[in-house]
Amino acid sequence: MISFLLAAPRGNSERPVFRATMRRSEKTIDFTQAVRRSHERLSMLAARLDAAAGGTSAQTPLQQDGSGGEYDMTFSIGTPPQQLTALADTGSDLVWVKCGPCDQCAPQGSPSYDPTSSSSFSMMPCSGSLCGYLMSQSLASCSAGGDECDYTYYYGLSASSHHYTMGYLGTETFMLGSDTVLDIGFGCTNMSEGGYGTGSGLVGMGRGPLSLVSQLNVGAFSYCLTSDPSKTSPLLFGSGALTGDGVQSTPLISEPGPSFYSVNLQSISIGEMTTPGTGSSGIVFDSGTTLTFLADPAYTEAQAALQSQTNLPLVEVSDPSQVCFQTSSGSDEVPSMVLHFDGADMALPVENYFLPVGDGVICWIVQRSPSISIVGNIMQRDYHVSYDVENSELSFQPANCDNL
């Protein structure tokens, strides 16, 4: 689990800049657990797309554990402040926390926010803009007097979802470190099902109007995930354009979904071979997915190029879809890997696409996807990744995360 510890705004720009730090508490990643959790998250994200398109396929519910490499955000809410942690998610928009007893809420065992103990809490009326947006998506309804906006927010398909949160909308004072932000719209949840880590809710950081990024009106945010699990990783809300050597930028696109941070992966270089990318289907940069996914034919051709240029013995594992090798001197005996986006190239360190799993075995972190393609958080390590929401651009550069 990774915690976000937010500090005061810095700089004199017109918009505030909030600085956060992220910490991964697990020292090593359990590859088997990462595979399971990443596939479950893939199912959830794909189900959201199906729901938006009016699809009918079922979704796989996420398990309620913290072993999948999620990011937890620490913040306070209310007056006087009540400190909570919640899953930070670039793949969704709604900000919500468990409210009151919440006996039918997931996850259990974490604290809940008590709106009756806060002097700054207000119910959001049906005239509120966030309520209007949810109503336009058939995710909210209004009380007879119009003073309460009730929501049921699905992370999959409403017809058969086991991954949802429901309650009423409110506005409240949030404390991000020592900074107070007024009138953040959020969901006060009294029933939920699914996997949200071990915190008290979820902080949506997607591209939609409900997200914390949109409500803070910062225009952009960035982070740098250090490869050293003993160190913190910085997160900046309101950060400007990346500067210095090695900055590359590529447009954000609307496929596979407008709320996701997606780009056009044109091709992939594996050693001396170049294989096709995902084309107009896009690939999603996602903080909540640990591993990386490629839909076919991108996955099959990249896997074949990798195996044909790797002179290491393959290791049989329980899942035949996994690509693992036996090595005696680490992962430097494998071919290079470069992602070619529209106008930008990401030359990956070997540690960003191979993971040691013990006894000299290394496994390729790229998985076959039956649906959408995703750049997971392992592949983003030691890059400063900037999401310029306002200008629809994603930028990155190799970085020493300690220096940001």
Image (tube, rainbow, N blue to C red):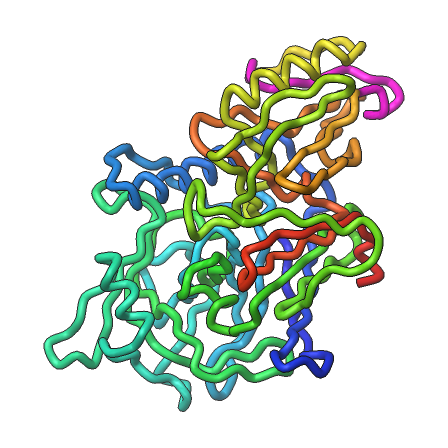
Tell me where the magenta segment starts and ends, as one range: 319-334
Given the current orientation, which residue lies at the most extreme front position? 343
In this rendering, is residue 321 above or below 118? above
x%, y% of residue 322? 60, 19
In this rendering, is residue 371 above or below 375? above
Judged left or right of residue 168, residue 295 is right
Magenta highlight: main SS: loop
Q: Nearer the viewer, residue 182 or 72?
A: 182
| Residue 109 lies in the magenta-colored region | no
Residue at (63%, 64%) from the top-left corner? 4
x%, y% of residue 184? 44, 77
x%, y% of residue 156? 33, 44
In this rendering, is residue 75 above or below 24? below
Judged left or right of residue 301, residue 150 is left
Q: Nearer the viewer, residue 403 or 261?
A: 261
Quarter of the C terminus within the rendering: bottom right
Q: Nearer the viewer, residue 60 or 204?
A: 204
Residue at (70%, 63%) from the top-left corner? 241
| Residue 325 lies in the magenta-colored region | yes
Residue at (71%, 50%) from the top-left corner? 396
Given the current orientation, which residue lies at the most extreme left position? 144
x%, y% of residue 223? 68, 57
Q: Quadrant of residue 391?
A: bottom right
Residue 281 is at least partly visible in this image: yes
In this rendering, is residue 238 above or below 268? below
Residue at (79%, 35%) from the top-left corner? 349
